[in-house]
Amino acid sequence: MKAFEALESNVRSYSRLFPAMFSRARGSIMFTEDGRRIIDFFSGAGTLNYGHNDHTIKAAIAEYLASDAVVHGLDMATPARSEFMETFSSVILRERGLQYRFQFTGPTGANAIEAALKLSRKVTGRQNTISFTHGYHGMSLGAMAATGNHFYRAGSGVSLSGATFMPYDGYLGPAVDTADYLRKVLLDKSSGVDAPAAILVETVQGEGGINVGSRQWLRSIQTIAKDAGALFIVDDIQMGCGRTGEFFSFEFAALSPDIVVLSKSLSGYGLPLSMLLIKEELDAWRPGEHTGTFRGNNLALVSATAAINIYWRSRSFSQGVQHIGGLMRNRLEAIAAGHRNSFAVRGRGMAMGFDCQMAEIAEAAARKAFDKGLVIERCGPDDQVVKFLPALTIDLETLNQGLDIFEQSLAETLK
Ligand SMILES: *Cc1c(COP(=O)(O)O)cnc(C)c1O
């Protein structure tokens, strides 16, 4: 570990939180160089929904590489690119009655968010974006302007402008429907809130603390966007690709976003791949107006196509995620009840949060869990929420082992 301390910038973070040399990984298990076996409940912040190194996906990548097919070609036409779009259109979109154009952006989620915001400004001729308290959209300046977290905002060093924050669902307690406030200020031309180009929302706030937007609230936000003449953008970077039990996290609310932003688990293998799904009539780009050297990297498109073919051609994968999500919820609620319910359990599908209320408790529990063989991350404005994002492909034995470790770690923390 010496190289990291001596050579890598102070900015490194996960090598501090999880101090071990990770040498191999398969499915939900990571192995360290000194032979430890560690269960992964972090999944690269939702990038490894199908686990580490899925062997069928790996075979597709290996075959592509072995054939000398084009790996990098900017956005030149390749069979990998057309096959991905055709597969995604038929298996994911058409099955759900959705129709979108694809825009491959630079490989980060943040770049896809930038593209979505730029397009909404271009389409509407407006500048403002409505985003939500505790929302997270990435580290570049435009995405950061729409991100709530004080620590990240402070790191940017310039004033962040162009976004107005509105209270997310539940922000003012269960009795207040925050959509009412949003509707009021957007329909009142003298509220002081500039007419927005877009409303940008996560259906479940991943980094923000696993805050769950209700079906009704999300539907209201979509309607408000329409009434306000703003584009309705769902940031499905972390909650998409099956995390909440369906491919898109908004299916349960039957939403029809103008733009959907996907990244993280899209490639299915941890390879960088981000894209926008854009309603055809909003595709106002001129050719080349948003570029990037690594847009739609072919290797990532090959793994993405394989992942869709393997997991999404039948409904059973989705049903499995919902089933396992239910087991996780029951178990976490039982753990909370064992501590006289001083903790809150939130989530949807296999994205669950255990709100410890106090950062010190969450931190100590996660640290002890790592010592016992579990990688688990925290989130929320004070990092007070322990975040459960196991691979959607996890087997029940490993899931229960991980939950056992968390339960023991929490109990020891509270002793
Ligand atoms: C991770 C994430 C992003 C940013 O993606 P990067 O690839 O880290 O730039 C944006 N929005 C959400 C909801 C995310 O979880």
Image (tube, helix red, strand yellow):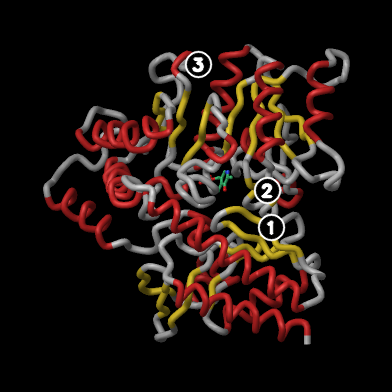
Q: Residue at x 47, y 13 (%)?
A: 281
Give the amino acid at mark 1. Answer: Arg
Residue 46 on image: x %, y %: 51, 55
Q: Does label 3 or label 1 sit earlier along the sequence? A: 3
Residue 215 on image: x %, y %: 66, 39
Mark 2 vs 1: CB contact within 8 A: yes
Residue 346: numbered disc: 1
- Please tell me whether mark 2 sits on a helix, a strand or a loop: strand
Q: Does label 3 or label 2 sit earlier along the sequence? A: 2
Give the amino acid at mark 2. Answer: Val
- Please tell me whether mark 1 sits on a helix, a strand or a loop: strand
Horizontally, residue 230 falls left or right of residue 251, namely right
Pick the quarter of the image with the C terminus.
Answer: bottom right
Residue 212: numbered disc: 2
Give the amino acid at mark 3. Answer: Leu
Figure quadrant of residue 219? top right
